[in-house]
Image (tube, rainbow, N blue to C red):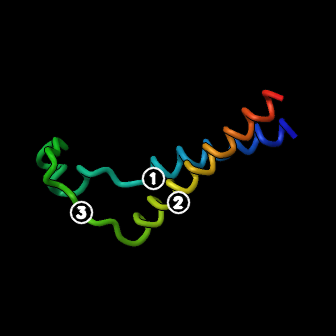
Amino acid sequence: MKSAIGILEMILALLVIVTILLQTPKSSGLGGTIGGGTDTGGGYRTRRGLEKVLFRVSIWLTVAFALVAVVQIRLGAS
């Protein structure tokens, strides 16, 4: 049981990393290319389509990772 939870935690960690790396940084696009990527707060834009899905999936995966980590700690303490 403990090893299955450990494997699940590793898979969730990798999925969190992948979904975060797939997201578009704020300084991308023409403004980030010309300005060198120094965004001083004026570059907010709404997420749409796949970017919005990746953002929400990364949040849910992070929550799931945290819950699995707590379960693993509880099982290890007993």
Label 1: which secondary element: helix
Q: Amino acid at mark 3?
A: Arg
Q: Residues within 10 Å of mark 3 (few under 14, many from 20)?
A: few
Q: Residue at x 25, y 53 (%)?
A: 28
Question: Horizontal and vertical percent for residue 45?
Answer: 24, 63
Which amino acid, by three-letter code, is at mark 1? Leu
**Figure check: 75 above or below 44:** above
Q: Which residue is mark 3?
A: 45
* Whole-percent x, y for residue 2 in the image: 84, 36
The outermost residue toward the top is 77
Q: According to the image, label 1 marks what residue?
A: 22
Which residue is most to the front? 78
Residue at mark 2: 57
Looking at this rendering, what residue extends furthest in the bottom direction?
Answer: 49
Residue 59 x, y percent position in the rendering: 50, 54
Q: Amino acid at mark 2?
A: Val
- Placement of the N terminus among the 4 image quadrants: top right
Tell me whether the residue at label 2 lies in contact with that at label 1, contact meaning CB atoms closer than 8 angstroms: no
Q: Quadrant of residue 77?
A: top right
